Image: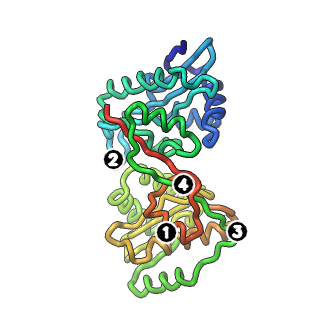
Amino acid sequence: MAVVRGFRPGDLAPVVELWNQSLVRDPITPGLFQNKVLLDPNYDPEGCLVALEGGQVVGFMLAVARKVPLPGVGLETGNGWITAFFVHPSYRRRGIGSALLEPALDFLRSQGRREVWVSPYAPNYFTPGVDEAAYPQALAFLQGRGFATAYRPLSMAASLLDFALPDWVQQAQDKLKDDDLQVGECQPMDLLPLLAFVHEHFAGDWERWVRETLRQITTGGGLPDVIWVAREGENILGYCQHTGERFGPFGVREDCRGRGLGAVLLFRCLERMRQKGLRNAWFMWASDRAARLYARAGFQETRRFAVMKKEL
């Protein structure tokens, strides 16, 4: 019979080891676990649960209720999240998952949460939801306990080895110039307009991404060409960035879409990534609608997630 209790300092090594045995597409290091779980300002030991049998760690579940507001979003007082869970492959179908889930849901209820999501939690999510191909048992487990799929984002990746800027992108950029719209690397004059743009149109975790990247740029820890902007005068209409081979965030103001801004931003950023010697580009999640633009740049689907939701 498994015993479920809160995480203790001595659990770090066995939990990480079991994580890597169980979530084979999403391995982790002890340092990353400490950074994204234990150092998360919303961490609560009552939501970080470990299952043991015979003194051995055989399962884990992490539930989060926001205690610190996310800029532009607030506390999201109705929402809770389960950001990671797994059971040792040899101990599945023995009730251990349910033994972890019930106290996790009780914890979220005690925090006044009305819905639980798996798991678009910012800033420290691991995946947007359940990888449908990699973890079908986890998907079935949640479905059997009242969770429903809310939406199905996808991950994509592209090789940059043979990337070349299509003629139509240059033509689109020329047309934008005729309309007094500029696309280029982020400049010092863009700092405040970019922060205002993200706050107004993409509030939430994007603000953290932008602030941290701008901080690196302004203190000499990064190059300005990791951020690209579309501007009209002093106003920012769209933006994208990359961190190494990871592309994004990326967005265009809703009322400015359909004018080619997004395509030019995407292709120019990828061109610069290629020029800097990067061989691939990837991102964790996007909608099927956005995927159509990415496909024009050579991106292909690599993973499909089920973002799941349950009323409490």
Q: Position of residue 274 (x, y in %)?
A: 66, 68
The residue type indicated by label 4 comes to: Ser
The reply, left or right, for residue 34 in relation to residue 68 is right
Q: Residue at x 37, y 77 (%)?
A: 233
Q: CA distance from mark 2 to mark 1?
A: 28 Å
- Front label number (2 vs 1): 1
Asked if the residue under mark 1 is in contact with the one under mark 4, i.e. CB atoms within 8 Å, the reply is: no
Q: Which mark is residue 293?
A: 1
Q: CA distance from mark 2 to mark 3?
A: 39 Å
Q: Position of residue 303 (x, y in %)?
A: 56, 51
The residue type indicated by label 2 comes to: Val
- Front label number (1 vs 3): 1
Q: CA distance from mark 1 to mark 3?
A: 19 Å
User: Taking the image as drawn, is residue 217 in sight?
Assistant: yes
Q: At numbered mark 1, what does the secondary structure look like: helix, strand or loop?
A: helix
Q: In the rendered image, which residue does mark 4 sit on?
A: 155
Q: Position of residue 124 (x, y in %)?
A: 49, 41
Dot 4 or dot 1, earlier in sequence: 4
Q: Quadrant of residue 116?
A: top left
Considering every residue shown, the one lying at the far bottom of the view is 178
Q: Residue at x 62, y 58 (%)?
A: 245
Q: Which mark is residue 73?
A: 2
Dot 2 or dot 1, earlier in sequence: 2
- Front label number (2 vs 3): 3
Q: In the rendered image, which residue does mark 3 sit on?
A: 161
The reply, left or right, for residue 163 in relation to residue 215 is right
Q: At numbered mark 4, what does the secondary structure look like: helix, strand or loop?
A: strand
Comparing 87 with 264, the one in front is: 87
The residue type indicated by label 3 comes to: Leu
Asked if the residue under mark 3 is in contact with the one under mark 2, i.e. CB atoms within 8 Å, the reply is: no
Comparing 91 with 187, the one in front is: 91
